[in-house]
Image (cartoon, rainbow, N blue to C red):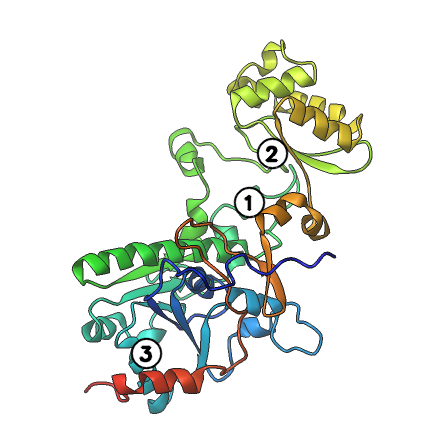
Amino acid sequence: MEKPASSTQADGTSKGALEGVRVVELATVVAGPGAGRYLADFGAEVIKVEGPGGDPTRRMGWTGPGETDSYFWKLVNRNKQVIALDLKTAEGKAGLWSLLQDADILIENMRPGKLEALGFGPVELLRRNPRLVVLRVTGFGQDGPYAMHPGFATIAEAMSGFSGLLGEAGGPPLLPPIAMTDEVTALVGAFAALAALRHAERTGEGQTIDVSLLNSMFQIMGPLPSAYAHMGYLQPRLGAGIPYTVPRGTYRCADGVWVAISSSSDSVARRVLALIGLGDDERFSSFQARSQNREALEAYVAAWVAERPSEEVLREFRRVDAAIAKVLDMKDIFADEHFRARGMIAEVGGVVMQDVVARMSKTPGRLRHPGKAFDADTKEVLARFATVGKQPEE
C-alpha cells in the first residue's frame, strides 16, 4: 500500500473559518462527536469531556498494534482537546461550569432529562451564558412517545423507512454496514449548530437544538413521504435500483469486475440507450416509460455489460459521456489516481484517515492531530479556565 501524503492543510499556515469558536462536547460514540469533529476540522476549539470510563468509541472496532484506542476514536475525535471529569462530583461539575461560562456551543447526547438531572439543563445553561448554543443529539428527540427508548443508528434506519428499502426484491430488509445514520446526523448537527451560532452572533441569543437520529434519516427519504401521502405509493425493495432512474444499479462484466451505472437525466439515458442499441425503442423513451419497463431494460443493460470485459465497458460508457464507475473496495481506493490527486486520504500523527470533507479556498480545514489519549489535556485545560469560575453560582 502506498503511504498517503500528510494532510494538505496540516502545516497550519491558514486560519480556520471557525477560529475563536469554543465548543464543549459531552457527547459519546459517533453522531454527537461527529458534529464536534466537523467543527474542529474548520478551526473551532473543541474540548471533549469524557466521564471516568471514557468514550466507548475508544474500544470500538480496530486498533493498531500495541494500542488501546481504536481508529474510529482517532478519526471521530481528531483535532479535539480531551479532558476527563466526573460530573457526579462537585469538583467535576465546577470544572464543567468553568468551561461553559464563555463557550459558544455545547454538544451533548444524553438521554432526555439526564443533562437536567446533572444540573446542566438548558434553562440554567442559558441563564449563565445567554448566547450559548446547546446541541442535543438523541435517538428520537427530546419529546414524543419514543423519547426515552434506547436509540441507536440501527433503530433509526429501521424506523425511518430506510432499512425497508435495502435488499433484493423478495429478500429481507437490510441494514447499512457502516455507521451511516451517525454520520448523517453528525452533519445535520454541525449545520444546525452553525445556523444557531449565526443567530447568536447577530442577536446575543443562544438556543437549544433538538437533533435526532430518526429525524436525520427520515429527511433523506426524498419524495417517498409525499408519494405515499398523495398516491399511496410504497417503494418496494429493488436491489441496487431506484424507481425513477432506469437503468441504475451494479452490473457484472465478463471479467468478473462490478461496475455501477446511473442514468439520472434524460440526456444520459438516451446516450446509454444508443450505446447498447436501444436508442429507437419507444418502451424506453422517457423516465416514466423506462420505469414502467424496468425489468426489460435492466435485463438488456445487464446482458450488454456481461458480454464485455470491464475495460471495454468503462471505455465505451466514457466515450459517450455516460456515468459509470468500478465498484471499489478500500484496496482499490488507496490505489486510485483521483483519490490521490485530490488528497482525500491523509496521514496525521501516524494515523491514516479521511482528510477534511469540504475544501474552502480562503479558510480551509486541516488535520492537526488524531484523537488523543484519555485525560490528555485535563490539567492544562482546567488550569486555563480556572479563573473563569471554580464553583457554580448559587
Q: Give the percent coordinates (x, y) of residue 321.
A: 61, 24
Question: Which residue does the numbered mark 2 point to in the structure image?
Answer: 241
Q: In this view, does 11 lie to the left or right of 347?
A: left
Residue at figure coordinates x 68%, y 72% from the top left: 64
Asked whether residue 85 is in view, the answer is no
Eye-nearest disc, 1 or 2: 2
Q: Is mark 3 on a helix, strand or loop?
A: helix
Q: CA separation, marks 1 and 2?
A: 14 Å
**CB atoms of marks 1 and 3 within 8 Å:** no
Q: Quadrant of residue 294?
A: top right
Q: Give the percent coordinates (x, y) of residue 210.
A: 33, 59
Q: Hey, what amino acid is under mark 3? A: Leu
Question: Which residue does the numbered mark 3 point to in the structure image?
Answer: 99
Q: Is residue 199 left or right of residue 350?
A: left
Identify the mark at residue 164; answer none if there is no mark.
1
Q: What element carries label 1?
A: helix
Q: Quadrant of residue 212?
A: bottom left
